[in-house]
Amino acid sequence: MRNGLGALLLGLTAAAAGPLHAQSELDRAPSRFAIYDGARIHFKNFGIGRTAVVFVPGWISDVTVWRYQVEALSARTRLVVLDLPGQGRSGLPSGPYSMDRLAGAIKAVLDVAGISRAVLVGHSLGVPVIRQFYRRYPDRVAAMVAVDGALEPPSLDSASVARAVAPFEGGGYRASVERMVGSMYPDDLEAGLRQMILGPALATPPAVAVTAMRAMYDPAIWRNDPIAVPLLVVVAKKTGWPPSTRALVQRLAPGARYEEMDGVSHYLMLESPDVFNSILTTFLDSVGVLRS
């Protein structure tokens, strides 16, 4: 496990994927909404079919982090990208902001979209979210992809969590977000990509950021129960995942694919989309969800 809350929560070939100033396929797609406990959960859909690849962003993030994956894959399979409750264009349902609640929001999207089974792709906080979805709705999961996010329990005790959360609870929310999120991508990251990451983070209400952070540290979600569907884990070498992470993955899901990407930071799918998409496409092809 990496050290520190920021490294846990948040973990360029952008020109090759298309200029940032051009309107992308993700931008052009209409927004759709599922209703979950009185709140609208935002998503965008590409293609048709009862099986889909479903992209889940991380902490105080939104659908835009998957821009280059939509461009690479939308012609070959059905895709859905969504905003977690309280983030992006999604509202906040009533009740506790827990991993179970976040998993329930994903189910609401799948139900409205008519998706019976999904390959769930989660980034950062999205990894424990999709794992919780798998625990609750295993028959709805065809495979999982964990992108620079934790599968093992954090090492922080309750006092340490409280200290880590404190900067986001007071008047220094914006500075705290800029400091934490900014530490998770390289200093020379293209300005448009930085805005793609920071904009949604700064727009997330502080209460959502804090409650989501606390929810991730709920001991109840950190059971080392087996993962019986195909699993791909993609991590950035720079974020410092220890050898124990690979060993844990193999214990949880024997035969899982574990990939380390070099020269990238936490937002590896934005920083090096060609390499990331090649890894992802190979896996998706192996589980039979891509058209030729």
Image: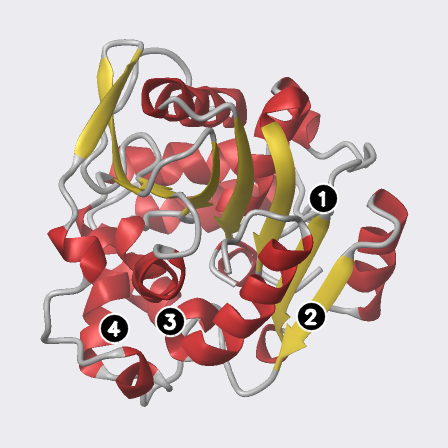
Res. 153 mark: 1
Q: Is residue 123 above or below residue 82?
A: below
How far, Cα to Cα, is label 1 from label 4? 29 Å
Secondary structure at badge 1 equals: loop
143 sits to left or right of 183: right
User: At label 1, which amino acid type do we have?
Assistant: Pro
SS assignment at label 4: helix
In this rendering, the label closer to the viewer, 3 or 4:
3
User: How far, Cα to Cα, is label 1 from label 2?
Assistant: 20 Å
Query: Cβ–Cβ below 8 Å for labels 3 and 4?
Result: no
The residue lying at 51 percent from left, 31 percent from top is 215
Q: Nearer the viewer, mark 1 or mark 4?
A: 4
Measure the C-alpha gap from mark 3 to mark 4.
10 Å
Give the residue type at disc 4. Answer: Arg
Asked whether the viewer can see residue 91, the reply is no
Instruction: Give the alpha-carbon distance from disc 2 to disc 4, as whole Å.
Output: 24 Å
Q: Which residue carries the number 4 mark?
A: 194
Identify residue for label 2: 259
Q: Residue at x 61, y 58 (%)?
A: 285
- Position of residue 186 measured from the top left corner of the image (x, y, whole percent): 39, 83
Q: Amino acid at mark 3?
A: Leu
Instruction: Write down the residue under mark 3.
Output: 270
